[in-house]
Image: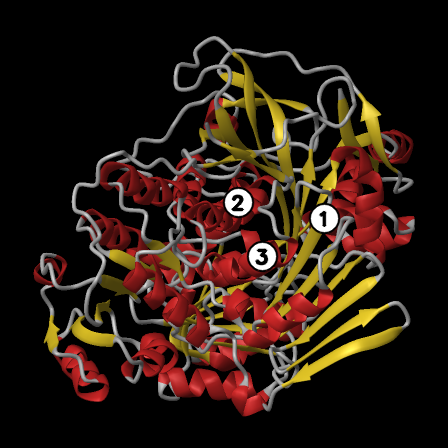
Amino acid sequence: MKQVVQNYKSGELALLDVPVPGCKPDGVLVRTAFSLISTGTELMKVSEAGMSMLGKARSRPDQVAKVMQSVATNGVPATYRKVMGKLDSYTPLGYSLCGVVEQVGAGIDDVKAGDLVACAGNEHALHAELNWVPKNLYTPVPDGLAQRHAAFGTVGSIAMQGVRQGEPQLGEVALVIGLGLIGQLVVQLLTASGVRVVGVDPDPVRCELAERLGAVACGDPGSAAVEASVAELTGGHGVDQVYLAAGGSSNQPVELAARLSRDRGRVVDIGKCSLDLPWNAYYEKELDVRFSRSYGPGRYDPEYELQGRDYPIGYVRWTERRNLACFLDLMARGRVDVEPLISHIADFDDAVETYRSLKDGDLKAVAVLFRYPDGSGRAEEVPAPEVAVPQVRRSGAVATPVRKPTGPVRLAFVGAGNYASSMLLPHLAQRDGVQLSAVVTTTALSAANAQRTFGFAEATTDLDAVLGDPSIDAVFVVTRHSSHAALTRKALLAGKAVFVEKPLALTEDELADVLAAVEESGNDRLQVGFNRRFSPLLQEARKRFGTRTGPAHLRYLVNAGRLEHGSWYLQQGSEGSRFTGEGGHFIDTASWLLDADPVSVYAVAAAGNEDLQIVLRYPDGSTATIAYVTTGAAAFPKETLDLLADGKVLQLDDFVRASVYDGRRRQWVGSRLPKARDKGQSAELAAFVKAVRTGGPMPVPLESLVATTSATLAVRTGLAGGAPVTLARAL
């Protein structure tokens, strides 16, 4: 098997062929799936190995003291041979991984071969294809947690032990100094504990990332903004806790900790930084300085780590292993999100080059993962992840027929929030042949406001009564994303035509439930609010572009911008990711322009934010690339699109201007005033109302709506697995 090793004398890094470790009792043999590079601890070791002997001595005075003691005891020649022998040998790297149990040793009954486990330990969770891991240094991975996320278990335990040492309480304010990998995790753990966090780091990118992950404010250690934020949050008293997660030789972190702490505050050292405590500052405030020892109780105790002797939970609540299991549980429940921390995933065969890139600064990263080959040394040929696109099935009989209205089309709205009030209802309120019959909201006042503004005949909070009203022809579902699928299903079963704002569903199970309602009732009268394809400007551009004979390439840049703090769109645990919520718009537009549904999805996430690159492949070889970016300039257009095929180009500039090029010249230009930007809502609503009135087909076939929804959901699957996802049509 292969393992990453380093020679501390020469600094050489190598991917070495070594024997497979034996499976001893009281442990398991684990085949690694992903291992995590600690960009703090490991890079420090790699950098030290490249120093001169004098540099090594200066960086490790503790080891120099041991050498001097050995000289006094054993003499210079013996000590020299001992030291040189130790330096001039290979040492392992790594201490945090996720893998599959390959073999179970005697005395192990909590896992079996084939189980997925997270492993810890700088002697047992190494960057190696196979590792033997003792009982107290592994824990099973919860169902549904991605392997690459589970590889963060050990560093998560380090951050968790640091937070436990700080004893945070609800409502307190904490300062985290150093926003590297450990610092970012500390920020999230504190936020999950009800603590408001201010972060400090000289890197503005890391500060921005920490704010996205829950910090109230972040800034440079010399910034007055940090002190101002602390003063505002604490009423001038200072923070309750400081977590030192920084490295390096500067004494600035401990000085800043003293300056911004309250009287009798707690200062917890997690990282490895200079600790020349300014006596007066710490004495006058009587600061409580604490150290956090690695993953938790049990660390460095051979009886615990090697012999598997656990500590009674009544005496030691949180051991190494319990911390590891707790952190995995928090990730599985969405309370901690490590995905934004992943800057790069490298194949294990490229391990040496990856370390060199990190050391030289060519690869700037918060977290880097190794993805492992199989035992033969080839990249593991894992079948591409597959997402089934459900088949639409319609029963012969309709339980509650959708009637063809003879008079005005009577509409009911479920939800009357900002989007419904600004983008849908103004187009419907004055439309001939439409009657706004009822508005249903969860609060009485919002229903009354919608009734007053748009002239609904009835305002109510009773959804069942509206769905049971035979005079209602169609129902608009314009609520929060998490309720779309359930409300759509309910309205379909009630025999109503349904217009649901995107997304149709947040999970594959929700999509299946909607389609089960179609099959059960025979009611397929469904439209999802994918309005871009109805834009008059884009419709005309497509017409001018004409038919094509060969494959096309489409580039779609979405300059989504940042959301305001507190937006419910950020509640990913309940409302899905931001792209899951609105990405269907862009996938539907691409599929409409390419006149097909995608057959595969490949998605890559940018580190530290919600930026995505998505590549869709279509049956005829066409591709669509969607760049979904939240970090662009606000003044730049939100949506720009280029379609290239057969020597022609279609360009769309934010639904304000469009052009078609044929050969060497521009054949057509269409434009609209910015105030008349039309993304197709009016035309889409007109098409839906017409379909309801006439009993004709819905504006977009249900099969297409399902395909777009499945492709949108496949983005999440692809991000978790790091590989293209095949969209297989279910039979």
Is 116 displayed left or right of 351 in the figure? Answer: left
Q: Amino acid at mark 1?
A: Ser
How far apart in space, not on screen, are marks 2 and 3 (Cα)? Answer: 19 Å
Residue 696 visible? The answer is yes
Residue 201 visible? The answer is no
Q: Quadrant of residue 130?
A: top right
How far apart in space, not on screen, are marks 1 and 2 (Cα)? Answer: 18 Å
Mark 1 or mark 2, earlier in chain? 1
User: Which colour style is shown?
Assistant: secondary structure
Q: Residue furthest top?
A: 106
Say the numbered circle drawn on residue 189: none
Question: Would you call the spot at circle 1 few (<14 residues within 10 Å), some (14-19), or many (20 or more)?
Answer: some
Is 673 displayed left or right of 520 in the figure? Answer: right
Say the numbered circle drawn on residue 592: 3
Q: Position of residue 715 (x, y in %)?
A: 55, 48
Residue closer to the observer: 260 or 22: 22
Residue closer to the observer: 723 or 49: 723
Q: Amino acid at mark 3?
A: Trp
Residue closer to the observer: 374 or 395: 395
Is 43 displayed left or right of 605 in the figure? Answer: right
Q: Position of residue 118 (x, y in %)?
A: 51, 33
User: Compared to 335, does 141 lie above or below?
Assistant: above
Q: Amino acid at mark 2?
A: Ala
Q: Nearer the viewer, mark 1 or mark 2?
A: 1
> Which residue is denoted by mark 2 in the rendering?
714
